[in-house]
Image (cartoon, rainbow, N blue to C red):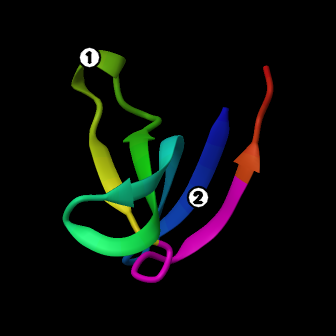
Amino acid sequence: MLIAKILDGKKTKFFEVVKVGRVKFDPRPGWVFTREIDKITRRCDVAWFHPDDTPFVWVRDFRG
């Protein structure tokens, strides 16, 4: 499981990386589709982030 630590303003949030690739709404490659970790799966927040626009602190592989 890939986990991303992202700065959101002054808050630090953790997301599971679901997919990395292209999107239809922007020509840049490398968009990251994420799911917020601290949410219940049925009600989780999902979002697309691009590394040029979003301050990723790190992305790590956690195998459990």
- Mark 1 Cα-neighbour bin, 10 Å: few <14, some 14–19, many ≥20: few
Residue under the point 63% across and 70% down: 57
Q: Are marks 2 and 1 in contact (CB under 8 Å)?
A: no
The image's mark for residue 62 is: none
Residue 8 in the image: above or below residue 1: below
Residue 8 in the image: above or below residue 40: below
Q: Nearer the viewer, residue 60 or 40?
A: 60
Q: Which quarter of the rendering shows the C terminus?
A: top right
Q: Which quarter of the rendering shows the N terminus?
A: top right
The reply, left or right, for residue 13 in relation to residue 58 is: left
Q: Position of residue 33 (x, y in %)?
A: 40, 48
Q: Amino acid type of disc 2?
A: Lys
- Element class at badge 1: helix
Quarter of the figure with residue 35? top left
The residue identified by callout 2 is 5
Q: Nearer the viewer, residue 29 or 15?
A: 29
Quarter of the figure with residue 40? top left
The residue identified by callout 1 is 42
Q: Position of residue 61 (x, y in %)?
A: 76, 42
- Mark 2 Cα-neighbour bin, 10 Å: few <14, some 14–19, many ≥20: some
Q: Position of residue 9 (x, y in %)?
A: 37, 77
Quarter of the figure with residue 24? bottom left
Comes first in the chain, label 2 or label 1: 2
